Structures are given as structure tokens and as C-alpha cells.
Amino acid sequence: MRTVPGPTGHTVVVGAGLSGLAAALHLLGAGRRVTVVERAAQPGGRAGRIEQGGYHFDTGPTVLTMPDLLEEPLAAVGRTLRDHLELIELHPAYRARFADGSSLDVHTRAEEMEEAVRAFAGPAEAAGYRRLRGWLEALYRAQLRHFIDTNFDSPLQLLHPDLARLAALGGFGRLDAGIGRHLHDERLRRVFSFQALYAGVPPARALAAYAVIAYMDTVAGVYFPRGGMHAVPRALAGAAEAAGADFRYRQEVTGLEQRSGRVTAVLTAHDRIPCDAVVLSCELPHAYRLLGRTPRRPVRLRRSPSAVVLHAGTDRTWPELAHHTISFGAAWEQTFEELTSSGQLMTDPSLLITRPTTHDPDLAPPGRHLHYVLAPCPNTDIGPGPADWRELGPGYRDSILTELEKRGLAGLGAAIEQQRLVTPADWSDQGHAAGTPFSLAHTFAQTGPFRPANLVRGADNVVLAGCGTTPGVGVPTVLISGKLAAARITGAPPRRRLPGRPVRTRPPAADEG
């Protein structure tokens, strides 16, 4: 593994998002002095927080899986997850509602899900679910050590026995076909393939290897941190500060002093911070601008679809909603075509509705509720541009509310007391290329050793972290990204272990209502 040469005693981490915080904790655990520079007033990056009218809106991810990956950076400084977070295992992990009026509670425990599938689609599909679950577990084991949790210096590192195992499992076939070998009910196939949206690739074109995301969602467990998702970066930042990290909030990095291929200081409007090494966990285009170089690639980078998000504080809720509810439209292949090729808004949308007050009513005023509605949409490279979205946004919000009311959430629009609408125009204002918070799509040419590397030629003491670099998009992978970045500086190989059942800090909780 290539590492940063020369002294690395003081590292500046640019960005206090999840990857930057993970990197900071691993660096602190390895004895480095760490300064974290963050332009916002709080940690979190994408996983931020807006407080409005007594409601606490999480601005980023709403789904937490693989909490053992939070244990690792905390353990680096002698802390445990239990010291900092109360996690609740969600039961069910999701509720899937379909256009034909049927619904399915998605459990991550094998016996419960097998029974749910049997009641939903019959014994043959229940047996297929058991086979699918075994396949997902095998795919995960084959990929974690040498394809996800690893620093690539060359594509030749792919030539490992695990590559043969992955091929034997059908990992280089298509995701939709791989799932179809086990399940025939189209509704069930959607439950285990909608995660391809996270990778920015339609299931019919995504590699079957990306079913590892479905493993995280439907096998490893889905959790909710009391205090909302923003409690996660707050916990990591608190542990880092207690371990000696110097946090400098409300300071945007404006430049890097460079000499002989090394960064010697990080510059803000207020400070010049001398350093021995730098972790840039900011957006990839911004990191390249700071460095004054963009690595050349044979083909243009392709970005994932974006999303419109409606944060709604309401005076009522609906009992048919679970903590996470996926409301599928009748369309499927057409939806992915619109999102990834034609650049149209979904004509028959599939939507994610999250109700965090299900398990933490303190996130809203007494007797009130939070609802987070995510509608995937094209990014601004292929769809409406930021200027268009400033016009489209209010009308699209109304159409989403109308659609949800048709699907059973009667009176949703009238129940809203506080709201915040986020569109690709807002993501663009925050510096997200192509107006998407989901960064680069996980096409084959942008995965593993072919994804933008976390080392940049000509910047000897700079390492990148975050969803734009290896291993990719999502809370688990950006946490790994921070660990891999720290390993480039400390020279210590990343600790790798195949987690068992993640440590539970509270018994499983059934959704209320």
C-alpha cells in the first residue's frame, strides 16, 4: 500500500462530514495531531441539521446500516458506540407499499422475513428468499476484504482468489437477473433491487455485485440513532474533540500553500494552518480546485441521479407508515430510464417516506410529527438545470403531495405546519456537482480501482476521502473511506473484520402506529 512520505505528525482534515470525522479519529488513534476545518457551524456535512419552528430536520441520509463501522473509528480512540449513541434496531426495517394496494413489512431477521414473504407471495417465494439471503451474504463476504475495505494502488490488486469467488457467485452478471434467479414475484424483486438507485445505475444494467447494498439494507439490520441521524456526526466529533482534535468551525478553506509537491499549510480567511499532511474530505471537484489539478481520465465522470426532498413538520401522521416506507409506483423500468437517460421527472414516482418521530418524538413539538419525503430525480447534467428547478420546485412539491394523498396519506398537504423543500438547485448551491448529493455513479468504470483514487499524483502528502473517492456512496462506505484515508497517512493497514450481527444498544423496537 502506498503511503504519504515524510513527516505526518500534524494532519489537517478539511471537512467535518462522516468521512472526515472517521479519518480524524483513526489519525488520533495512531498518535497524530489533528486539526479539523469545517465551513459550517456544526459537524455533519451532508448529515446536517436544520431547526425550524420546533422541528429538527435531518438534512442528509435517513437510513443507518452497518453500525459496526461506527465502532471502528471510536475504538481507535478507546471509545465505544455505547458511550456516544443510543441505537434502535428498526422492526420492520422498511414497509413496502405497492401500486396494487398490497404491502410488505421488510424484516432483516431471516425467520421473520421468510414468514412475511410466505404470507405475501407463497411458499415458493419464501424458499427463494432463503436462497437469496444466502447469496447476498456470500457476495458480501467475497467483496468486503479486497474490493470495499481496501486501498487500491493498481487494478492488478483485483487478481485475488476473492475475484474468482465473486465471479462464481455471478457477481459480474446483472443485478436484476441475479435476484430473478431466486425471486419471481416482481414486487419482491423491487424490494431487493431498488438500492441500485444508491449506486446510480438501473437494476437491469447494474452489476450483481452491487447487491451488497441490498445486503446492508435487508440482512445486516437498519438502525435509528436517538436524536436523529445528525446525532452520528455529533457523536464522532465529540469523541474526536475529547481525544484532542482541534475543531475550527465557520472557516472555509480558501487555498493550500504548496512547495515541492507537498502542501505546507491550509489557508482560510482567518488562519494559516501549517501542516504535515492533509485529508480533503470536501466535494471532489472542490478538492481538485484547491489542489490546482484534476487527474485525467479516459472518459468523463458520470454522476448519480439526484433527489427532491421535502421536510415536513405536520400536526398529524398516518398509521400505515412505518419508520421507513417505500411507496412504489406501478412503473419500474420506465422510472429508471427517466432518471438516468431521458432526464425526465418520474411520471409514476417511487418515493421514500421516513418518519423519524416514530422512535424519537422529541424531534418535533409535542403531538407533532416529522415526515421526510425523497423523490429521486435526474441530475442537472441530463435533466432540468438549477435555474429551471427554482421554477419547477414548488409545483413538483405539490405533485408529490397529491400523489401521496392518492396513495392513502389523505390530508397530508393540509397537515403541514413547517416545511423545507430541497431540489437539485439547492444541492448545486451547496457545491454538489450536477446538483446531486449522491456523487459519482457506481458504474464498472467508477468502482474499486477505477474510481477516483484517494491519492492524487503531484500532491505527495494529500489524501482524499468521501463519497467521490474509494469505496463510494453511502454512510457505511464513507466511514470506510475515512479509515482508508487515515491508513494512507499512518501506514497502518486498515483493520479488517467481517462483522457478525452488529452490536445492539437497545432491543428491537416495533414501529408505533
Image (cartoon, rainbow, N blue to C red):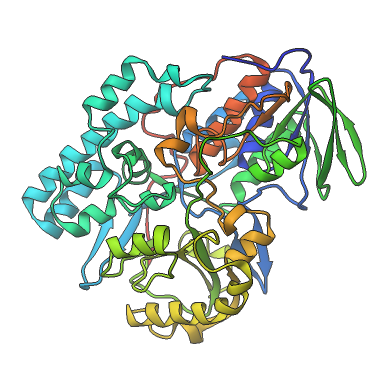
Tell me which residue sits at (50%, 83%) in the image.
415
Determine whether, in the image, residue 159 is placed left or right of residue 479: left
Determine whether, in the image, residue 436 is placed left or right of residue 211: right
Please tell me which residue lies in front, 459 or 186.
Answer: 459
Viewer can see residue 166 = yes
In this rendering, the answer to whether 214 lies above or below 423 is above
In this rendering, the answer to whether 200 lies above or below 168 is below
Viewer can see residue 420 = no
Determine whether, in the image, residue 455 is placed left or right of residue 384: right
Q: Position of residue 357 (x, y in %)?
A: 50, 64
Quadrant location of the N terminus in the rendered image? top right
Q: Position of residue 11 (x, y in %)?
A: 77, 26
Q: Position of residue 274 (x, y in %)?
A: 88, 28
Please tell me in which quadrant of the rendered image residue 410 appears: bottom left
Q: How many marks?
A: 0
Q: Position of residue 397 (x, y in %)?
A: 51, 77
Tell me which residue sits at (78%, 49%) in the image.
39
